[in-house]
Image (cartoon, rainbow, N blue to C red):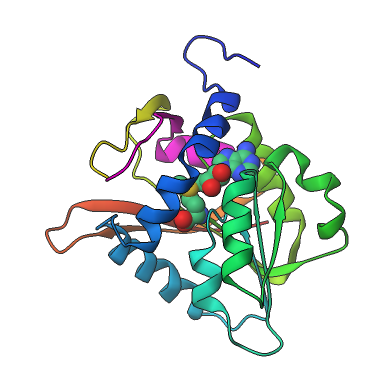
Amino acid sequence: MSAEPGQLDTTAHLASWEANADAWIAAVRNRALPSRRITDAALLQRIAHRPYQSLLDIGCGEGWLLRQLGGTAGRRLMGVDACAALIEAAAAAQQDADFVCVDYDGLAQCSSLVGMSFDWIVFNFALFGAEADTAALGFALAHLAPEGRVLIQTLPGGSQEATSCETFAHLPGEWTPMPYQLRSPADWQRLCAAAGGQILDSTIVCDDNGVALSILMEIGP
Ligand SMILES: C[S@@+](CC[C@H](N)C(=O)[O-])C[C@H]1O[C@@H](n2cnc3c(N)ncnc32)[C@H](O)[C@@H]1O
């Protein structure tokens, strides 16, 4: 499916992850993304502030988050992603989590997720699409356990919604440019409302010089 002018081409977005899977796995596992030291810690700290027994990582990539959270008996961890190579790498590196290859539009029909609910459902830099993001967030809100929360970490946006392109030129390896959707705070509010939720907390994560690296949002029904 090709996009209207000014709209994200979701097929191209997902194709870039297929093309970049090996380079992405190396970048994350070799800690080549300096900002991630701060954004990973912010995410882990937020997850830890509420007791939980189950967590679903949507757009989990090569699975670093679930590896960090593994090792606790009785805790149910799941990761889903459209990119088969990333899901294979995640599953190969961790025994105590379940990984499923599915895209956001397929979540509601995914047999592995039927009847499940989670205390946390996390999107870590994984909502860069357009319509598919509304479906994924709606799915997440409908699959929260009582008192459960959706946690989104994303790039600080501009003043209005725009398509952009990440070339990954600052990272080692061969990369295919990734087209993505950049949202403003108002766009995030609209997306949450369209998915049936509301933003309960929004925190800007900064580096030591006060430069904004991400926004961390807690979403509830
Ligand atoms: C920037 S990576 C982040 C991966 C991981 N959350 C992390 O923190 O390293 C974005 C991930 O979202 C996944 N993704 C993007 N759009 C998707 C869609 N429509 N369906 C399923 N996965 C998607 C990509 O395949 C990719 O693995």
- Tell me the residue at 59%/84% (across/down): 51
Q: Which residues make up the magenta segment?
A: 172-194
Residue that appears at 37% across and 45% down: 155
- Residue at 73%, 49% in the rendered image: 139
Magenta stretch encompasses residue 112: no
132 up-or-down from 38: above or below: above
- Classify the position of the N terminus by image quarter: top right
Please give the name of the residue rendered at 46% of the width and 39% of the height, measured from the top-left corner: 20
Left or right: 204 as drawn, with respect to 11: left
Count of numbered circles on the image = 0
Residue 218 visible from this viewpoint: yes
Report the side of 211 relative to 36 (left or right).
left
Check the image and name the residue furthest to the left. Answer: 209
- Residue 13 coordinates in the image, percent (x, y): 52, 30
Q: Is residue 176 magenta?
A: yes
Percent across and percent down for residue 36 are: 32, 60
The spot of residue 77 in percent (x, y) is: 66, 72
Residue 195 lies, in percent from the top left, at: 67, 42
Q: Quadrant of residue 167?
A: top left
Query: In terms of depth relative to the viewer, which is nearer, 114 or 31?
Result: 31
